[in-house]
Image: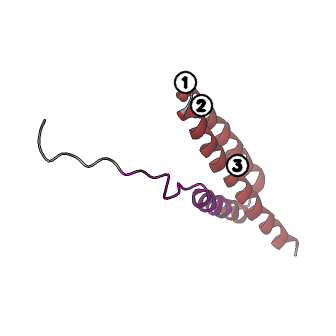
Amino acid sequence: MTEALSLASALLAGVLLGAMFFGGLWWAVRQGVSSTQPALWFLGSLLLRMSIALAGFYIVSDRHWERLLLCLLGFVMARLVVTWRFRPSAEDQTRPAAEASHAP
């Protein structure tokens, strides 16, 4: 029973790590687009998100490949949920103007 609880907690930790990673990516892109120094936002966010995610994977795995695999599965599941939740709506997507068929 304790092994099943350990594996379930590894899956939950992966979901939380993924939500933090991809939610942080979404937030950094929103901030970076309107910033005067977007490279600072993107680089800082990347370093912080990667550090937290890798440290989390290391702590959760505790040298067990099964826990690492379930944590990774939770991470990917969180990616799917975050990208589904924050996808642009139909009214946010604008069509580009039709191109002219001749040179000016």
Cα–Cα span, label 2 and label 3: 16 Å
> Which residue shows up at 53% across the image and 34% down it?
33
Is disc 2 surrounded by few (<14), some (14 to 19) or many (20+) residues within 10 Å?
Answer: some
For marks 3 and 1, the one nearer the N-term is 3
Q: Position of residue 17 (x, y in %)?
A: 71, 52
The numbered dot on residue 37 is 1
Q: Nearer the viewer, residue 33 or 3?
A: 33
> For the C terminus, which image quadrant?
top left
Residue named by callout 3:
20
Helix or strand or loop: what does disc 2 sit on?
Answer: helix
Give the mark count. Answer: 3
> Which residue shows up at 58% across the image and 61% down it?
84
Residue 4 placement, left or right of 26: right
Q: Nearer the viewer, residue 100 or 43?
A: 100
Residue named by callout 2:
41
Cα–Cα span, label 1 and label 2: 7 Å
- Judge whether residue 62 can be spotted in this image: no
Asked if the residue under mark 2 is in contact with the one under mark 1, i.e. CB atoms within 8 Å, the reply is yes
The numbered dot on residue 61 is none
Q: Nearer the viewer, residue 5 or 86?
A: 86
Please provide the residue range marked out in magenta: 72-95
For marks 2 and 3, the one nearer the N-term is 3
